[in-house]
Image (cartoon, helix red, strand yellow):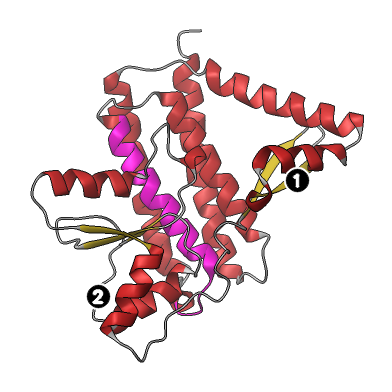
Amino acid sequence: MFTGSLALPRKESSKFASKICCNILDSVTQKTTILVVGTQDSSKLAGYDKSSKHRKAEGLIEKGKQIKIMSEKDFIIMCNDEDNDLNFQIHNTDSKENVLKKIKTTQPEKQSLSIEINLTKGIAEKVEEVFDQFSTEEKKIFFEASKKQQEFIDSIKDCSHEEKITLGNDFHEKLEKIKSSYEEYEIESYVDDDIEILFIIQSEIDELTDLTFDLMKNKIAINEYYEYIDGSIDIIDSELEEGEIPKNVKKYAKLIFKELDKTKDEITTLSNKDS
């Protein structure tokens, strides 16, 4: 099982794992024996310092399950030790540190700004450098939109445990609709084409599923849940802008947007019910 951002595309890492007779799983289960942990984005972890998959694996370990948690570097070493002919290596060894994070914000007129932060240069330093390139008006637009979005998220009132359970069950129905569309849009035929967005979508759906269980157990507030869904939409949407994406995959992604947006609307409705 993999979690976090890997230096190599997950599909490529999975191929190497398969060559040393590993079965790749979509989620951490009782059958999991190895969890490879890549770079974890704290903004997506709902206040935790580890992903839900990482936390679940640690929970199973505490219950006596034999699961080895390793870094991507240790995973590479393990693969090469198992099969010397693999010569598994990452040529661009600093690629994880060179990840470009896109922060998008939209003003009322639907014009948008995009900021790229190069993590190798230090977040504060790079943010300052990028902001210096903005006009006064652009800076104002960015800060006002960011403030407005955060104020909206903070304003979402928490709901009852029963309402969270209802919302969680409704989300699982949406997941079933997404899964049924997988065949409708012939997505399986694109998996072997190493289309990165498909792995990102699967990762986001997995994380949202785990987060939904946390919601139904009343472990997280409803505004945290909303913020994560909103972030997943942004992540998938930004990937749609990269390279050539088959039309069927785009349709599949747009269906996901539609279902996630419905859940956001339901949360907003819940929050306003007593207003």
Give residue 188's position: percent from left, percent from top.
Answer: 42, 74
Total labels drawn:
2
* Amino acid marked by disc 2: Cys
Main secondary structure along the magenta-highlighted residues: helix
Residue located at (28% from left, 37% from top): 213
User: Which of the two residues, 124 or 215, is positioned nearer the viewer here?
Assistant: 124
Give residue 133's position: percent from left, percent from top.
Answer: 88, 42
* Amino acid marked by disc 1: Ser
Q: Is residue 111 left or right of residue 209?
A: right
In the rendered view, would you say 260 is above or below 73?
A: above
Disc on res. 114: 1
Residue located at (67% from left, 48% from top): 102
Q: Using the numbered discs, state the Cα–Cα distance from disc 1 to disc 2 in whole angstroms.
A: 40 Å
> In the orientation shown, which residue stands out farthest toward the top?
275
Q: Is residue 53 left or right of residue 40?
A: left
Give residue 32's position: percent from left, percent from top.
Answer: 20, 61
Residue located at (54% from left, 48% from top): 257
In the rendered view, would you say 79 is above or below 273?
A: below
The verdict on residue 174 being magenta is no
User: Which of the two residues, 57 or 106, is positioned nearer the viewer here?
Assistant: 57
Which secondary structure lies at badge 2?
loop
User: Which of the two residues, 27 or 91, is positioned nearer the viewer here?
Assistant: 91
| Sequence-first disc among 1 and 2 | 2
Give residue 4's position: percent from left, percent from top.
Answer: 43, 54
Q: Residues within 10 Å of mark 2 (few under 14, many from 20)?
A: some
Residue 169, visible in the rendered structure: no
Disc on res. 22: 2
The verdict on residue 208 being magenta is yes
Residues rendered magenta in the picture: 192-215
Residue located at (54% from left, 59% from top): 96
In the rendered view, would you say 75 is above or below 39?
A: below
